[in-house]
Amino acid sequence: MESLTNFFQLFLNGLLTGMIYSLIALGFVVIYKSSKIINFAQGHLLMVGSYLCVILVKSFHLSFVSALLLTFGFAIFLGLIIERLILRPLIGEPILSVVMATIGLASVIKSALMIICGPEIRVFPPILHGKILRLGGLPIPYLTVYSFIGVGIFLLCFGAFYRYSRTGIAMRALADDQLAAQASGVSVKKAYGISWGIAAMVAFAGGILIGNISGVSSSLEPFGLKVFPAIILGGLESLMGAILGGLILGVLETITVGYLSFLMPVDVGSGVLRDVVPYIILIFILMVKPYGLFGLKDIEKV
Amino acid sequence: MTAKFCGDFKVSYQETNKLLQRPLIKFWVSVLIILICLFPFMASPYLVSIALFILISTIGALGLNVLIGLTGQISIGHAAFMGIGAYTSVILYTKLGFPFLIGIICSGLMAALLGMIVGIPSIRLKGFYLAIATLAFQFVMEFVLIVWRNLTGGADGLVTSPPSLFGFEINTPIRYYFLCVAVAFLTTLFVLNIKRTNYGRIFMAIRDRDIAAEVLGINLFKYKLLSFAISSFYAGIAGSLFAHYVLLITPEQFNIWISVDYVAMIIIGGMGTAKGAILGAIFIGLLPEFIKALSVPLMHHFPHLVENLIFLREGIFGMIIIIFLIYEPEGIAKLWSRVRDFFKLWPYSY
């Protein structure tokens, strides 16, 4: 019984981490679908979101909700700016150039953040901390519950946007067949801009969520790269795949760390293991099923 | 009155393949070699140490340029191979007492072996997928270096001593400088020659369209692995030279950002050419110095800049990468040849 409770505890924690991963993965997939670019700065956008929100709440004494809305507004703005200044001039360039441009963007964002905000850890004021819901003997913090609900609503809105709104449908058309979509009057530039805006927004949402759980500091940086296994597992083109991939990755990571950290040398700590497990999973996925669960296999013609 | 070249006239295939295309170039190359040899005797020790790091990163960048620039396989894990080279060499030389020469060659071979293993997925994966696979290798390698205590000393790293070659102690920076110059010279020559052989042309065919290359009868698997092996061999050698210069190696010195530095070098320098790799290594090596020099006058106005110098470097580094990608995607090498062409045809540029 003890071990079963332990397992469920780990599973729940994993789902919570997985939620965050799903949000970040979603950002990757949105950008990839519309412009075939992988954004290596996704983790840094996440940092911007969490820093901005925590500063608005703590230094400007705004309520959490208004800070949240302001942060989302800024996300769309930032996404549009990045797309306009950096990515649009690089349309049609080789993959490596685009990858490096986003890596360059990552270091610009990181250094700007560190110079402006300083290295100290910032903590969100306790909104939901401490309260615990008991579900059949399992203690579940309210933070987890609300995160689930919040992220769920977010994802639903997002899905509805893609499925029902005119812009969303245009963006899906563009992802499906760029030439045909353009011929029927879809603006590629607008769609790229919007997809960057959305990607920044989901990254910011993820950032605020992690910021609430573990505090805001430069240690949030690796989150961006750790999500690669999730998007590869889900398939680069699939929104549903990204969400599922994120959840699976979160659960796998937490359970592996929970059960295997005794193998590590005493003073190394489980953090090092936690950081590397996703990449080991990644290598495994790439060997077995490189195009993921829902991804499209490239069919090449010469 | 001297006659000026106003175009390259080549009448045979051998001529287009010559390393030193024109008599004038022979002259400039010899001047350059003499200058490089005189440099440590004229410059301050600080400048020599910068030059040493530039030489070492030149070797690494040359290797990466074979992989990315010639063969078109993206790798964001170059520093991991440097790390493997560094650790192999230190373990062989310091712990097991092998001669330095064997250590440095084995470090190259060890890195090449692992490079080939990492290269195996390249037969199925392309572009982003391969980039991510190499990224994963980079992190797993760092993890192994931290956890495999008994062999690597964990996060504390390993201490080593200056090497000796055939009984000759290479214990001063100037001696070490000449060792690095010699290795860098050999490796540059080798890379220049790859492009002139069948192998180089096969690599470029794979880069331009790998399926087309396969249809023409090229064994993709073999040549992609070969490219990975050459590139990691270079990284291993560079890592070994690095280790015996700094004398203390830790896993941190071979992290993801060093890999990014290397990719930046060949992008900023120019892809696919040895000249590009060298110019890129020089540029990235001198960048922190420029920023330091630049920040001195700024320091009076912004006193807290000192503690942020490292972040400032990172930010400017990122911006330079982006600016190069947008405005000069072919790098300094292209810039250089454009300036040269301007003066060659001056004043009648049409």
Image (cartoon, coloured by chain):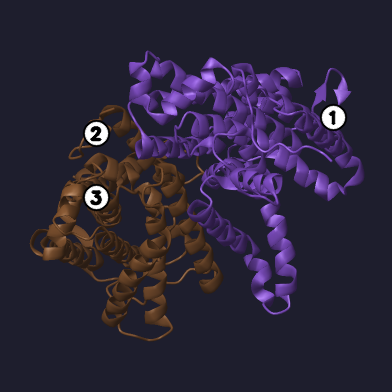
Chain A: give its colour.
brown
Residue A33's disc number: 3
Q: In the rendering, at what x and y percent does residue B260 appear?
A: 53, 45
Q: Residue at x 27, y 73 (%)?
A: A128
Looking at this rendering, what residue extends furthest in the front direction?
B1
The answer to whether tags 3 and 2 share a subunit is yes
Find the distance from the CA under tag 3 to the CA under tag 2: 14 Å
Look at mark 2 in the image and give the residue it sits on: A298
Q: Nearer the viewer, mark 2 or mark 1?
A: 2
Looking at this rendering, what residue extends furthest in the left direction?
A164
From where the camera sits, is residue B107 visible? no
Q: Using residue A130 as the reference point, say whether residue B331 is left or right of it.
A: right
The answer to whether tags 2 and 1 share a subunit is no
Which chain is tinted purple?
A: B
For label 3, the crowd category at 10 Å Cα-Cα, with few meaning under 14, some 14 to 19 and many 20 or more, is many
Classify residue B166 by image quadrant.
top right
Q: In the rendering, at what x and y percent does residue A181 appear?
A: 16, 53
Amino acid tagged 3? Lys
Residue B170's disc number: 1
From where the camera sits, is residue B8 visible? yes
Q: Using residue A21 as the reference point, say whether residue B133 is left or right of it.
A: right
